[in-house]
Amino acid sequence: MSTAHESTDVITPEALQALPQPLETKGDWDHVFSYHPMDRVLERAEGIYLYDDQGQRYIDASGGPFVMNLPHNHPRMKAAITDQLERFAYPHPTMANPERARYGKMLAEILPGTLNTSYLVSGGSEAVETAFKLARQAQIARGFPDKFKIISHRDSYHGMTLAALAASHNPVSQRHFVPMIQQWPNVRQYSDFDRPDGVSREDWGVQCAQALEEVIHYQGPRSVAAFIATRHGSGPDYATVPPVSYWKTIRDICDRYNVLLIADEVVTGFGRTGRWFGMEHFDVEPDIMTLGKGISSGYIPFAAVAITDALKATFTDTNTGFVHGFTMGGHGLACAAGKEVIRIIQDENLLENCRTQSERLFSYRDQLMAHPTVADVRGWGLYMVAEVVRDKNTMEFFEPDQNAERLFQGIALKNGLALYGTLYGPRRQAAFRRGIPIWISPPLTITTEQVDDLMARLLDTFSEWEQKVLS
């Protein structure tokens, strides 16, 4: 086998055709717009497994796009949704919806600090939009009408609506919409990739966080309303968990300049990191928290925005109404699903299982790192990312015509693994010099034996893939 940097071979069409392929849009599929699955048709799902219409079984290794905190087809989830459906599904807005209040109380009991009030929506992007509008209206109510800018991390991800894209600073996802997108300011993420030799993570965390203060200074503190970020890195630094010093310093800077801190917990909430919410690891309370994905474990579209008592008082004390709303916010079935998710996580001790299985999952780090294409393995809880490259020395990914990412997905499916695709591997810019993420994010119920099975299949996939792309 040649070294990675010597290989320029293009994967042949024959090699690709022998593996699962992108679904052909013909027949009934011709009426579905912009849909890009592989040609394996889902028939049913059970536990951590997916089954196609030919009876083949696949481990749901990524929980879809990190949404399945609970297993598929959980009997308690089905019963909770069905029981609510017997009463009502859509709550008429002129009548009080008791399920909304009951869910809000349960959510407040697990949220950290004084995040005791929630606004319910139906998706993560909606939650981010809601957080932005809430931050803007809160600053006006507090007497700061010039504060409107939202600062976020460069190359982060917060959703697909225009405002969420504006905060993501990803040229691939923004490229068609630049004239329609507000050009929000951005700041670097914490990254271990460029941490100087001899500088500790804690000291580097402070230095990286101070970049926010510099951006606020040059934007003008009077104009900055909020700062939004995920608990771990995104883009090239997916799953990089900053040290405590980073978030402590970010909180101090936000307080100093009257900037609201928005914690995007759409991915990291509801047990994914081994605690209810990622921010709990840093002992830092945000002003606003966005929630989604695991909030209903994908059983019903659902999301929420939680706010502190102080932020709620901004609206109530000034008699300011929140100008906002979505038709499906607080849907009866969503509230029922959300309540049962909390109960199941508590009753089945899934936070503890997440921590236990996290140790097992990350015990495979050295075996993954032994592969010539794996530049790094990082994460927390049951959220792992392997950063995959063509050459560990240059951190370059494969050329687009090698179809390397598509080949990896195909081999994984052949080996019984369903992984979430990055979507942007073939379009990676040459100047980027970083790999693409392979995500492992299984349901929190996964057992030790299932972790071992998943990782054995993943290691075999890497070996088989490397024989094709590096030989």
Image (cartoon, rainbow, N blue to C red):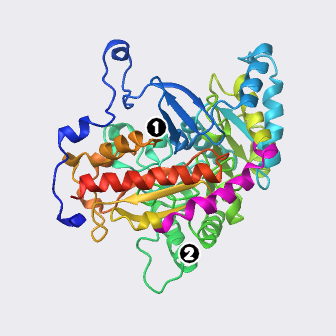
What amino acid is found at the position of numbered circle 2 in the picture? Val
Residue at the spot of label 2: 206
Residue at the spot of label 1: 160
Q: Position of residue 442 (x, y in %)?
A: 58, 46
Q: Position of residue 394 (x, y in %)?
A: 27, 69
Question: Is 358 inside the magenta-drawn segment?
Answer: yes
Which residue is painted at 77% across and 16% down in the image? Answer: 94
Residues under numbered marks 1 and 2 in contact, where contact means CB atoms less than 8 Å apart: no
Within the image, what quadrant is residue 471 found in? bottom left
Which residue is painted at 53% across and 40% down in the image? Answer: 60
Which residue is painted at 25% across and 54% down in the image? Answer: 469
Q: Position of residue 323 (x, y in %)?
A: 65, 32
Magenta stretch, residue numbers: 345-366
Vertical placement of residue 53 versus 399, above or below? above
Q: Position of residue 338 (x, y in %)?
A: 73, 34
Neighbours of disc 1 within 10 Å: few (<14), some (14-19), many (20+): some
What amino acid is found at the position of numbered circle 1 in the picture? Met
Q: Is residue 407 left or right of residue 61?
A: left
Distance between the alpha carbons at the discs numbered 1 and 2: 31 Å
Within the image, what quadrant is residue 434 found in? bottom left
Q: Secondary structure at mark 2?
A: helix
Neighbours of disc 2 within 10 Å: few (<14), some (14-19), many (20+): some
Q: Nearer the viewer, residue 118 or 421?
A: 421
Which residue is painted at 43% across and 81% down in the image? Answer: 196
